[in-house]
Image: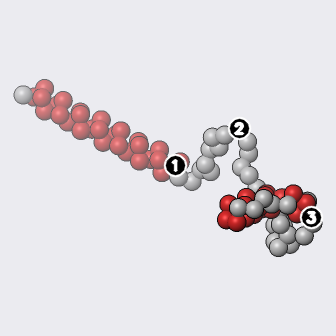
Amino acid sequence: MLLRAVLTILRFAILRCVLVGLVAGLAGCANNPPISTGFAPPALASEVDPDPSKKTLASKVLSAIALERVTGRKPDPARLTELN
């Protein structure tokens, strides 16, 4: 009977110590910066294009594909190399 009481007290004491250790460990990690998981450093924002109205080649190609699907007409390849 006494052994059962001692074991119960020890079990709760060990459980309490583990829980306090977990809480203290997690609270200490909350102030640290995140650890990188990849091989490359974090990406930085690039400079914004000063003229957003200028079309890129990709947007011209996508526009030509959309035009072909809607109208059924083949796009003019010369228009893809024109500068805007």
- The outermost residue toward the top is 3
Q: Which residue is mark 2?
A: 39
Q: Which mark is residue 28?
A: 1
Q: Is residue 79 left or right of residue 22?
A: right
Q: Which residue is mark 3?
A: 82
Q: Which mark is residue 67?
A: none
Classify 10 Å Cα crowding around label 2: few (below 14), some (14-19), many (20 and above).
Answer: few
Query: Given this view, does label 3 or label 2 mark the residue nearer the observer?
Result: 3
- The outermost residue toward the left is 1
Q: Nearer the viewer, residue 28 or 6?
A: 28
Q: Residue at x 30, y 42 (%)?
A: 16
Residue contact at pointers 1 and 3, CB within 8 angstroms: no
Residue contact at pointers 3 and 2, CB within 8 angstroms: no
Q: Residue at x 83, y 58 (%)?
A: 57
- SS for callout 1: helix
Kind of residue at disc 2: Phe
Q: Is residue 6 left or right of residue 65?
A: left
Q: Residue at x 17, y 31 (%)?
A: 6
One can see residue 66 in this view? no
Alpha carbon distance from label 3 to label 2:
39 Å
Q: From what the image shows, is residue 28 above or below residue 61? A: above
